Image (cartoon, rainbow, N blue to C red):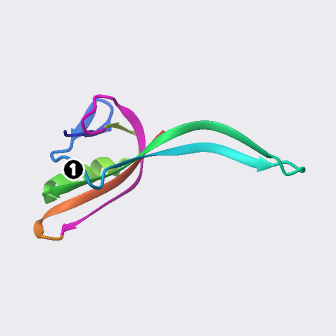
Amino acid sequence: MTCQIGLSGALYTVPVDPDATNYEVAYKEISSAKRSLDGSLQTSWTAIKRVWKVSWPGLTQDQVVALIAELNRQAYLIWVPPGSTEQYTVKVNDRNWRSMPDSSDYRIVTAELEEV
């Protein structure tokens, strides 16, 4: 159930599966709304986009460096979610890593990816 992320044609395959307990797919409404003088609400809906919150536990330091390098690219990335063959173009909203609580040899990388 691995996943991939990166630039088109050069996707990085994350070597560990995402943590299923922290994996989340949410939907974000893209719209604008304003009130007219009589108080009625006028809304213009544009789209509904997906937002993935994902964490990868059990990465070595070298794997963290490779994954964070992909997540730090200042470009839209291609994201292939776990268990899927469908590709999405995403923007990385947030990314970080920390040591695992029970092991100083392994790290956890977490990221939030938003469909563009």
Q: Residue at x 21, y 50 (%)?
A: 66
Q: Position of residue 58 (x, y in %)?
A: 14, 57
Is 51 in front, or is 12? 51
Under circle 1, the secondary element is helix
Query: Is residue 96 rendered to the left or right of residue 103?
Result: right
Q: Label 1 belongs to which residue?
A: 66
Q: Which residues are magenta?
A: 81-100
* Main SS, magenta residues: strand
Was residue 97 drawn as part of the magenta stretch in this picture?
A: yes
* Residue in view at x 35 percent, y 31 percent: 87
Looking at the image, residue 31 sits to the left or right of residue 53; the answer is right
Left or right? Give the position of 116 relative to 35.
Answer: left
**Which quadrant of the figure has residue 5?**
top left
Q: Residue at x 70, y 39 (%)?
A: 44
Residue type at mark 1 is Ala
Residue drawn at the location 26% of the way across and 39% of the way down: 82
Dividing the image into 4 quarters, which one contains the N terminus?
Answer: top left
Above or below: residue 49 compared with residue 85:
below
Between residue 108 and residue 65, name the one nearer to us.
108
